Image (cartoon, helix red, strand yellow):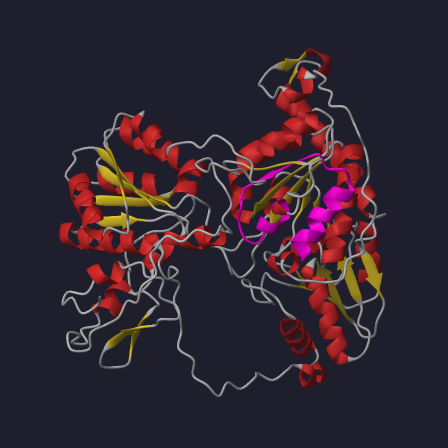
Amino acid sequence: MGNEAIARGALESGVRVVAGYPGTPASEILTSFVSYPQVYVEWSTNETVALELTQGASLCNQRSMAVMKHNGTNIVTDFLMHLNFTGVRGGLVLISADDPGGNSSQNEEDTRILTHSYAHLPVFDPCSSQEAKDMVRAAFELSESTELCFVLRPVMRVCHSRTMVVFEQPLELNRPAEFINDRSRFVMSAVVEKSAGGQMRPVVRHRWLNQKQVELQALVETLPFNEIELGEGGIGLVGCGIGYTYCKEAEDLIGRKLPILKLGTLPLPRAKLLAFAERVDTLVVFEETEPVVERLVKEMLFDAGKQVRVLGRSAFLPSEGELNDGIVLQALARLDPTYEKFIPKPFPFSVNAPTRTRTQCVGCSHRGLLHALKLVARKTKAVVTGDIGCYDAGSFPPMELQSTIYCMGASIPMGNGIAVSGLGQPVFAIIGDSTFFHSGLPGLINAVHNNARLVVVIADNGTTAMTGFQPHPGSAENVRGEQVRATSIEKIVAALDIPVQTINPYDIEETIAALNKAVQHPGVSVVVASAPCLLYARGRGEELFTEHTVSVDPEQCNGCRVCIDFFGCPAILFDGDKASIDQLTCVSCNLCLDVCRRGAIS
C-alpha cells in the first residue's frame, strides 16, 4: 500500500518522531510505525498539535514527520505560516494526503495551494507507491540541507494503491537530541531586528523564505522526479503526480509513445518545462484537483515569451473530481479526432442495482441515540446540527436528523449561532468523543461563557471508529496498546459548571428522558451517550450482547414500515408486506424492540 511505502521511506530515513491525527486516506501511515520501538509515534489530539510536536522534535535535531489528511492541513495553517518563516533543524516532513472526488471526505480540495502557493513550502506530488517512498527519503535530506519543512502530498489513489516497492537499508543516525537557543529565528514576534537595520523580525524572516525560493528553483532541476519523455505528435501531456500515471495508462491504450513531461515537484523545473514546450504546439496539464501547475506553466511560458497553448483544469478538463485514463483519452480526442477510437466504451450494466445511503453498522449504539434524538427533536421542533463521525450518517435517509455538517468541531458553534439568532426553537448539537477532544471544547466553552441555550449531545463510543478505531485522549490505551491516562469527558464538562447526564444509548427510553430533561434547561446542557463501538469491541474479543434470536411475529406486524423508514437497521428486511430479521447480520442489540409500536419484534 502507498501509505506503507510512505512510512517505509521515513523509516529508511531515520525518522525519530511521528505524530498525526487519523483521517482517510492517510491513517495507515502512522500505524505502520507501531512495530518499530526506535520511533516515537502518537495519535495527537488534533493535527495542529501533531505538527507543533514534530517541529519541537526537529528543533532538537531529530527527524520527524506529521501525518494528516487535507482537512487537517486546513487546521494547521496558522502554525504553518510561522513554521515557513522559521524553518527547521532536523528534517521535518508534513504528509498532507488529499482526497480528490471526496471518496472519504466532506469536501475535496488541493492542499498544494495552502502548502506551496500560500506557505511557499516545497511540495512533492508522487505518482506511485515507489515514488512516494523515494520522495520521502529525498524530502528528509533536502529538509535538512535547505532548513525547510518539506511537504509530501499523496492523493487517495496513491495512498491506497498496491504496487511493488524496493526496500533499502534504514539509516542509523543515532543523533543525540540537542536544543540550541536561537531566539532571533524561533521566537516569532513583532520585534525590531537591529542587525537588519531596524526592520521588523517578520520582514527579516519573510526575506529568508523568499531567498530559499531561489535555492529551491535550482534544486528541482536536478531531482529525478521531473523528467521529459519524448514521443510522437504536437500535443504534450504534462502529468503531475497521479496525473502522470493516468497519462502513461492512456499511452499504453494508444500503443505508442506520447510527449510527456512528468512533474513531481513544486516549485516547477523551469528549464525542463521550457525545453519540453519547444517540442510541442499544445500542452495539456493533468493534475488533481485545482489548476495550480497549469497557472504556473502559463506564467512561466508568458515570462519566457513562448507562444504555446496551455489547457487544463481551468476550462478544458473537468474542474472537479478525480482524473482517470479515460479523461486523458477524451482530452486527446477533443484536440485530435484520431484518438477517439481509443476511448473505452462504457460497460453496460444489465442489473439496475438499488442505491445505498450511508448508515451505521448493525448494532451501532449511535442508531439508538439518533432514533431517540429524532423523536425528541420532532416533538420539540428542534434544529439539530451535526459534526464529523460515524453518527453523521444520521443526516441521510431514513434518519434525516442533522441539518448541518461542515467540519470537525462546527456543530456546537453553529448550534450556538442558531440559538442566539432569535429563531426561538430548541437546538441540539451532536458531536463524537474524538471530535470533541479534537476541536469541540472551544465551542462548548464559548457557548457556556455567553449564556447560550442549547443541548450538546456527545456520542462517546470510546474510539475514533470511522477512521479505523484509533485511540484518542479519552482512551485508556495509546497507539501501541500501552496503558495511558484516559481523560473523562464528563469531568471536563463538569468543570464548566453545567448539567451533564451520562446515558446508555441502547436504552432508548432512558435516552429520550435525558434529552427531554436537557432541552428544558435554560442554558447549555450536555448529554453523553456512552457505549463501546460494537466492531471495536468484537475486534478485541468482547461481546456486548447476549446472543439470542430476534424475530418478527407476522401476526402482529402490519407492514407499517416504521422499523424500515424511521429506524433503518440494515438487519431488518421487508418483503413488500411484512418485516423480518436477517439472522446472518443481526447482533441481538434489541434496539428494534423499542421501535416497533405494535410489539411485533421480540
- Answer with left or right where residue 360 lies relative to residue 384: right
Q: Which residue is pictured at 72% across the width and 28% down the height?
A: 208
Name the foreground residue: 503 vs 87.
503
**Taking 376 as reference, is 499 above or below it?**
above
Name the foreground residue: 262 vs 48.
48
The picture places residue 445, in percent across and down from the top left corner, at 33, 29
User: Which corner quadrant holds the N terminus?
Assistant: bottom right
In the rendered image, is residue 217 in sight? yes
In the rendered image, is residue 264 in sight? no
Quarter-of-image position of residue 291: bottom right
Q: Which residue is pictured at 79% across the width and 56% down the height?
A: 273
Quarter-of-image position of residue 553: bottom left
Looking at the rendering, the stretch of residues picked out in magenta corresponds to 1-30
Name the foreground residue: 183 vs 158.
158
- Answer with left or right where residue 370 lies relative to residue 56: left
Q: Magenta stretch containing residue 29, yes or no?
A: yes
Q: Magenta stretch containing residue 595, yes or no?
A: no
The picture places residue 342, in percent across and down from the top left corner, at 69, 82
